[in-house]
Amino acid sequence: MSTLMAVDTPYLYFRAYFGVPKRFHSADGRPTNAVRGVCDFLTLLVERYSPDELVCTWDEDWRPAWRVDLVGSYKAHRVDERGEETVEEELAQQVPWIREVLDAVGVPVVGVPGAEADDVMATLAHLHDGDTLVVTGDKDLFQLVDERTRVAYVAKSVANHELLDQAAVLARTGVPAERYVDFAVLRGDPSDGLPGVAGIGEKTAAGLVAQYPTLGAMIEAADDATSAMKPAVRRALDSARDYVGPASKVVTALTDLRLPGIQRGAVDEERVERLAVELGLGRSLRRLAQALVAMQ
């Protein structure tokens, strides 16, 4: 049974940009810290887990219109005056180089129009006939964890990340992975512009998930004057009844995307050497190439 490593590439390059010193530059003086960081991160992960397959997922649409139609505040705080994602210029100019580097070492980069990297990872995990390791710093992807899928949670550190299985998700959040979406809808996520249900924090959200099988059942209990639900929680859910349904669809990662053909390429050693010099990557890109060759 093969192991697939599905990587949240946008998360990694944002983390690399803000976490790797900006002293690294291309031959013509432009910053390349995000490129170098992505190379180093992938090398570490490949060497640690020795996956049979590696896919770097991509945001073809970082804020899909269908999600915004459901919850208008979705990622609204991250939109610039042009209606595009707010990205520092020094990072934006490195993103094409990251794509080029991944292509040079033969790593397939997969995105789908109208979908986020999260949706691509969820579909990959759903379709893969084997074990899947999802590399991300996004808690929403805890929803993917099951008997065949784990999350390498890199929010605090790639080198010292948390490896989460079903038991670890339950211990960390207080809810089982299959109910994480309900928990996230109630709690909210300011980083994605999702307000949650006002007055319901993590502890109350976890308690509601434990007590009721679905969000719909929570709303029904709020409507039932004879239920044991506390008045404050009843009022909170009543005020958010038009939010929880759409928010649940927003938070749920798609598992039915039509993915393009995915095929890993060979390492182009000549191109790797050229990019290593042009982008001032030192041994970072060469080490990644070596780690990927060892996978074959």
Image (cartoon, grey):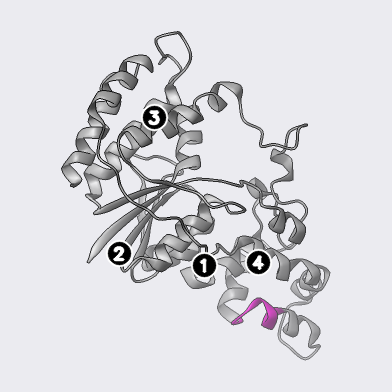
Name the residue that disc number 4 marks: 249
Label 1 CA crowd tier, 10 Å (few <14, some 14–19, many 20+): few
Instruction: Name the element at disc 4.
Output: helix
Name the residue that disc number 3 marks: 37
Name the residue that disc number 1 marks: 256
Label 4 CA crowd tier, 10 Å (few <14, some 14–19, many 20+): some
Q: Which residues are magenta?
A: 212-218
Q: CA distance from mark 2 to mark 1?
A: 18 Å
Q: Are marks 4 and 1 in contact (CB under 8 Å)?
A: no
Query: Is residue 159 depicted above or below 26 in this figure?
Result: below
Name the residue that disc number 2 marks: 131
Q: Is residue 171 visible?
A: no
Label 2 CA crowd tier, 10 Å (few <14, some 14–19, many 20+): some
Query: Is residue 103 depicted above or below 46 in this figure?
Result: above
**Mark nearer the N terminus (3 vs 4):** 3
Residue at 65% in and 66% down: 249
Label 3 CA crowd tier, 10 Å (few <14, some 14–19, many 20+): many
Q: Is residue 54 left or right of residue 191?
A: left
Residue at 73% in and 54% down: 68
- Please provide percent x and percent y for residue 14: 51, 34
**Mark nearer the N terminus (4 vs 1):** 4
Amino acid identity at mark 3: Gly
Which sits in the foreground, 113 or 284? 113
Q: Is residue 281 left or right of residue 86?
A: left
**Mark nearer the N terminus (3 vs 1):** 3
Instruction: Name the element at disc 2.
Output: strand
Instruction: Name the element at disc 1.
Output: loop
Q: Which mark is residue 280?
A: none
- Please provide percent x and percent y for residue 83: 75, 37
Q: Is residue 165 left or right of residue 189?
A: left
The answer to whether residue 248 is magenta is no
